[in-house]
């Protein structure tokens, strides 16, 4: 099964990336094909730069839409905003989401994963977040479909690279910058956007 692996990245990046690698290994050992965007895109995009974070999130959501399930791994029932956006994208696409509690010992070693019967209460996306994710997913899906059609029609890959670069958000459109700034401002102030 094609699985999208979702887990927190921000905070202690090194620890959270090591944890994501362990989650991927655990799911792959069960015979699944796994994809964790925060392990791939952070190799060439800087998650601390808003434009590059947006680009990675948009690209990750584009790939999420071709996965059969989303597996979310949480530590201490904490769910990040990025994971909430991925859960919202899965809900919008009708993709099942499974939740797992991950346990780590004090030395930072992976101990076990326990399936959860439901999402932690703070994990459910708000209506504005669902709208924002729908917008990103629709843009990515249309763009990828156009590029795929051109390639199938015989266009050279090199001729499609510029469009792919635009699709992945090399330069964030002003309306997206404004929406992201409004969202971050409202959540920073503890308000429901």
Image (cartoon, helix red, strand yellow):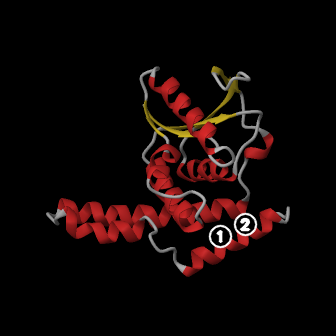
Q: Residue at x 56, y 34 (%)?
A: 18
* Quarter of the figure that contains the N terminus: top left
* Quarter of the figure that contains the C terminus: bottom right
In x, y percent, where is residue 105? Answer: 71, 21
In x, y percent, where is residue 165? Answer: 37, 67
Residues at badges 2 and 1 in contact (C-beta under 8 Å)?
A: yes
Q: Residue at x 43, y 27 (%)?
A: 32
Kindly state the secondary structure of the residue where label 2 is placed: helix
Kindly state the secondary structure of the residue where label 1 is placed: helix
Q: Residue at x 65, y 59 (%)?
A: 130
User: Is residue 193 visible in this depiction of the protein?
Assistant: no
In x, y percent, where is residue 115? Answer: 66, 24
Q: Residue at x 40, y 66 (%)?
A: 142
The circle on residue 109 is none
The residue tagged 2 is: 184
Query: Left or right: 79 with respect to 155?
Result: right
The residue tagged 1 is: 180
Image height check: is 71 above or below 106? below
* CA distance separating discs 2 and 1: 6 Å
In x, y percent, where is residue 129? Answer: 68, 61
The total of numbered circles placed on residues is 2
Question: Residue farthest to the bottom?
Answer: 174
Image height check: is 175 above or below 47? below
Which quadrant would residue 54 be assigned to in this image? bottom right
* Mark 2 nearby-residue class (10 Å; few <14, some 14–19, many ≥20): some
* Mark 1 nearby-residue class (10 Å; few <14, some 14–19, many ≥20): some
Work out whether residue 94 or residue 60 is closer to the camera in this orientation and state it. 60
Query: Left or right: 60 with respect to 148?
Result: right
Work out whether residue 149 or residue 79 is closer to the camera in this orientation and state it. 79
């Amino acid at each position: 099964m094609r699985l999208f692996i979702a887990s927190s990245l921000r905070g202690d990046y090194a620890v959270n990336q090591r944890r994501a690698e362990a989650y991927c290994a655990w799911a792959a050992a069960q015979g699944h094909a796994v994809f964790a965007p925060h392990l791939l895109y952070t190799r060439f995009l800087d998650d601390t730069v808003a434009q590059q974070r947006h680009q990675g999130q948009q690209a990750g959501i584009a790939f999420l839409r071709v996965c059969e399930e989303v597996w979310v791994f949480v530590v201490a029932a904490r769910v990040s905003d990025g994971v909430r956006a991925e859960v919202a994208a899965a809900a919008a696409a009708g993709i099942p989401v499974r939740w797992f509690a991950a346990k780590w010992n004090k030395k930072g070693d992976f101990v076990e994963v326990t399936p959860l019967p439901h999402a932690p209460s703070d994990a459910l996306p708000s209506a504005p977040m669902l709208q924002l994710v729908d917008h990103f997913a629709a843009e990515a899906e249309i763009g990828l479909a156009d590029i795929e059609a051109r390639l199938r029609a015989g266009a050279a890959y090199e001729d499609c690279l510029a469009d792919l670069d635009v699709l992945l958000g090399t330069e964030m459109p002003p309306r997206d910058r404004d929406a992201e700034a409004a969202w971050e401002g409202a959540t920073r102030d503890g308000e429901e956007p």
